[in-house]
Image (spheres, grey):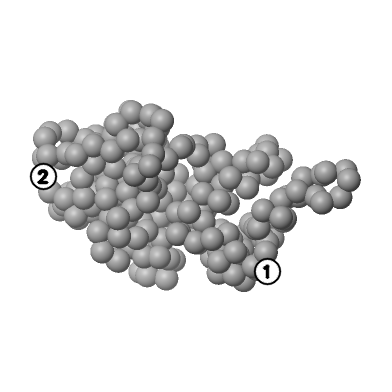
Amino acid sequence: MATLSHGEIWRAIDALAERFDMTPSAMARMAGLDPTSFNRSKRGSAEADGRARWPSTESLAKLLEATGVNFSEFAALTERAPARTPNGMIGGGRGAPLIGLAQAGQDGFFDEAGMPIGAGWDEVAAPDLGEGLFALEVTGGDLAPVYRDGDRLLVSPSQEPRKGDRVVARTTAGEVLVRELGRVTARTLELVALDHIGESRLLSRDEVAWVARIVWVSQ
């Protein structure tokens, strides 16, 4: 936490509230906190010294637990808070190819490394977050409340996913899974349900075509 500035922490909290389509007050209630915990009035001292007020580590821990966001993803919100265009897409970068999440299991859209190829892609404005960046649009409510209908997952096949990262995995059978990366061994990958309630999947390396890290979510 010491490496993150006061402004970055609060911007990340605001970005998290926007992702879940909530006010900071509603998000605080969801986390079991006082509704005013993340209000703007709590972010600076009203006293003469003007000292900045930081959210407590306990309140942040409860927030991350309630939203299912790990700390590395929260930290990424502080580092990459790109501006949004009037139509709600992330702007300020280059275009990323876009398809629906349901299409991602079809042949012809990815190479063996999970890089986007071929025709049939739309395009969405996106920040420059690595080679091969692509976007998958969520349809339906299967991934709620973490990801909702219409959310666009920005996915980077060039960034090595680590345990605890949210990922998109495609099996050799064409199944596409949006999960959290669990235990990884030389022979297997564990894919944990986003809500940590559903059943985990343990796949052999031979069953996995590619795994790519989710680096941002655009609503």
Question: Is 209 situated above or below 93?
Answer: below
Q: Residues within 10 Å of mark 1 (few under 14, many from 20)?
A: few
Outermost front residue: 86
User: Circle 2 — which element?
Assistant: loop
Which residue is depicted at the point 23% across and 52% down? 101
At 21% from the left and 50% from the top, the residue drawn is 100
Q: Position of residue 177 (x, y in %)?
A: 28, 56
Total tally of numbered discs in the picture: 2
Amino acid type, mark 1: Asp
Task: Locate residue 75 relative to residue 161 in the image: left or right.
Answer: right
Would you say 97 lies left or right of 3 here?
left
Q: Which mark is residue 107?
A: 2
Of badges 1 and 2, nearer the viewer stands: 1
Residue 130 visible in image: yes
Hey, what amino acid is under mark 2? Asp
Q: Image check: 176 left or right of 119?
A: right
Q: CA distance from mark 1 to mark 2?
A: 49 Å
Q: Which of the two residues, 62 or 18, is positioned nearer the viewer here?
A: 18
Secondary-structure class at tag 1: loop
Q: Residue furthest right?
A: 48
Q: Is residue 202 above or below residue 76?
A: below
Q: Position of residue 62 (x, y in %)?
A: 61, 63
**Displayed quadrant of residue 26:** bottom right
Q: Residues within 10 Å of mark 2 (few under 14, many from 20)?
A: few
Q: Nearer the viewer, residue 183 or 136?
A: 136
Q: Nearer the viewer, residue 12 or 163?
A: 12
Judge left or right: residue 38 versus residue 101: right
State which tag comes first along the sequence, 1 or 2. 1
Residue 132 or residue 91, whichever sits in front? 91
Q: Which residue is mark 1?
A: 34
Q: Does residue 181 appear anywhere in the picture?
A: no
Q: Residue at x 80, y 50 (%)?
A: 45
